[in-house]
Amino acid sequence: MAAKRASIPTVGMGRLTSTMAMGKLNPTVSVGELTPMAAVGELTRLVWGGLLLAAPGRVLRAMGGHPSSTPLVILRVLGVRHLVQAAVLLRWPTPEAFRLGAVADGVHALTAVALTADRRRRRVAVTDAAIAIGWTVHDGIAASRAGARSRR
């Protein structure tokens, strides 16, 4: 007997319809398809976002920066972005959601690389770019694995 899978309503034909009500499942939006690797990654993102939000000065110093050279509000905003992104990906672990996360992290990595031009911020920018590239790769792998699971 196959286990029932919950489904998130999708938009179809101009109105909101439930994929289960149509008698079929749309596996790309099924709930509970979070792989262990993706779960660990997103829980790690929650911790990282929490650190950026709660102790941005300590994080900045640990990365070799000085709180006076980088407004701490920037790190707090980044922390909120990571918390929201992790919450969304933990709740809706779809290939599309992970791809959007990879795009957000990729853009973040590009902006960090651009900041390496400023010698005062170079060390922090390189570290930040490396972290953002790591998140980009993580989300890309999670998207492909979620997509592979959805095709089973």
Image (cartoon, rainbow, N blue to C red):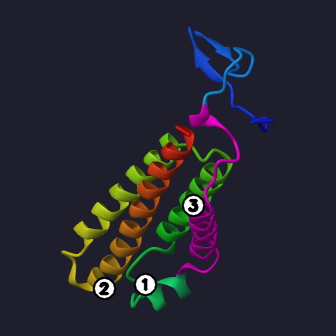
Q: Badge 3 is on which residue?
A: 38
Q: CA distance from mark 2 to mark 3?
A: 28 Å
Counting from the top left corner in percent of width and height, residue 1 is at 81, 35
Q: Badge 1 is on which residue?
A: 68
The magenta segment is: 27-56
Counting from the top left corner in percent of width and height, residue 105 is at 41, 58
> Would residue 128 be found to the left or right of residue 85 on screen?
left
Looking at the image, residue 2 lies above or below residue 15: below
Q: CA distance from mark 3 to mark 1?
A: 35 Å
Q: Which badge, 2 or 3, comes first in the chain's sequence?
A: 3
Counting from the top left corner in percent of width and height, residue 149 is at 55, 45
Q: Residue at x 64, y 67 (%)?
A: 43
Counting from the top left corner in percent of width and height, residue 116 is at 23, 75
Q: CA distance from mark 1 to mark 2?
A: 15 Å
Q: Amino acid at mark 3?
A: Ala
Which of 47/7 is in front? 7
Q: Badge 2 is on which residue?
A: 123
Q: Amino acid at mark 2?
A: Arg
Looking at the image, residue 70 lies above or below residue 139: below
Determine whether the residue tagged by mark 2 lies in a helix, strand or loop: helix
Kindly indicate the quadrant of the structure image that contains residue 12: top right
